[in-house]
Amino acid sequence: MKSGYVAVIGKANAGKSTLINVLVGEKVAITSPKPQTTRDRILGVLNREEGQIVFADTPGIYRQRNELTGLMMRTTELTSKEVDVILFVHDGHEGVNESDIALMKKYSSLGIPMLIAYTKIDIMPEERIPEDVKTLYGAGITVDVYPVSARKGRNLKRLEGALFSLLPEGEPLFPEDVVSDKSERFMVSEIMREKILLKYEKEIPHGVAIVVNKFETREDGVKEIDLDIVCEKQNHKAILIGKQGKALKEAASFARQDMEKFLGCKVFLTTYVKVREDWRNRGGMLRELGYVKEED
């Protein structure tokens, strides 16, 4: 039996979380078209007859703009050195440029077995795929490239098989019924943040953090959830709430529906919006909001 950890690494918005969700068969990470959607390392567990793959979804590689982004990039770098295999996810729809090649070379030079998942092939001309693969090999990228579409399920079995072939022999790292290392409480906060990322434009969603204050099951089986939506400016708070609270009600309604689907029960959701000026650059606030772990 094969078993081990696979770090899923790539530029922001390359499709890492979508790929993991599809492979695992469960929603273990939120997704959106915006960069910086994933902020922490999230494990997703795939069980097959061949063994177990534990995917480590990492924050997308992104230029550091604040203290929070710096922490995210540190998470990605540390994770890439603590795994059995690296799966570098590249957005094929965006083509190949020098910075892509430089990143691939950086991670392939770590001495850890690596594969490249060339994603989003369902939304690009097929003739581009062999051209880009040839460009990569011509630039000195010697690892195998697997063109895939997570949304259409194309070539995922081949990718799975290749990953298993690189893993060491070993017993499962997690029980078979476990699909993620994250708690329901964590996933509820991420679902709320996902809906904000999808609904609001510009910088506002990136300056939002979610704090779950109450997560309890009532006697009637309804999950009662109270949470704070933390933003950086008073005018951001006004935009988040919207005229007569309409914007916030819509975002909360969408989030509640997904929470109910995820938890398998009715949810009574209460949301509050609070301002914490420039929290992404304040170490104390980052710790309070859970982005700085004790070992950091």
Image (cartoon, rainbow, N blue to C red):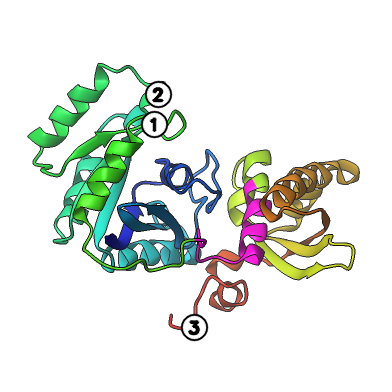
Which residue is identified by label 2?
122
Q: Quadrant of residue 230?
A: bottom right
Secondary structure, mark 3, is loop
Q: Amino acid at mark 2?
A: Asp
Magenta run includes residue 181 = yes
Q: Is residue 9 left or right of residue 284?
A: left
From this viewpoint, is residue 296 visible?
Answer: yes
| Residue in the foreground of this view, choosing between 21 and 48 | 48
Percent coordinates x, y for residue 57 in the rendering: 42, 56
Using a 10 Å C-alpha cutoff, classify the residue at mark 2 as few (fewer than 14 neighbours), some (14 to 19) or many (20 or more).
some
Which residue is identified by label 3?
294
Q: Is residue 251 left or right of residue 24?
A: right
Q: Are marks 1 and 2 in contact (CB under 8 Å)?
A: yes
Residue located 58% across and 79% down the image? 284
Dividing the image into 4 quarters, which one contains the C terminus? bottom left
Residue located 72% across and 67% down the image? 212
Return the disc, 3 or 1, that comes first in the chain's sequence: 1
Percent coordinates x, y for residue 1 in the rendering: 27, 60
Secondary structure, mark 2, is helix
The residue segment tinted magenta is 177-194
Using a 10 Å C-alpha cutoff, classify the residue at mark 3 as few (fewer than 14 neighbours), some (14 to 19) or many (20 or more).
few
Q: Quadrant of residue 210?
A: bottom right
Q: Which callout, 3 or 1, points to the residue nearer the camera?
A: 1
Q: Main secondary structure of the magenta part?
A: helix
Rounded to the nearest angstrom, the CA distance separating label 3 from label 2 is 42 Å
Which residue is identified by label 1?
149
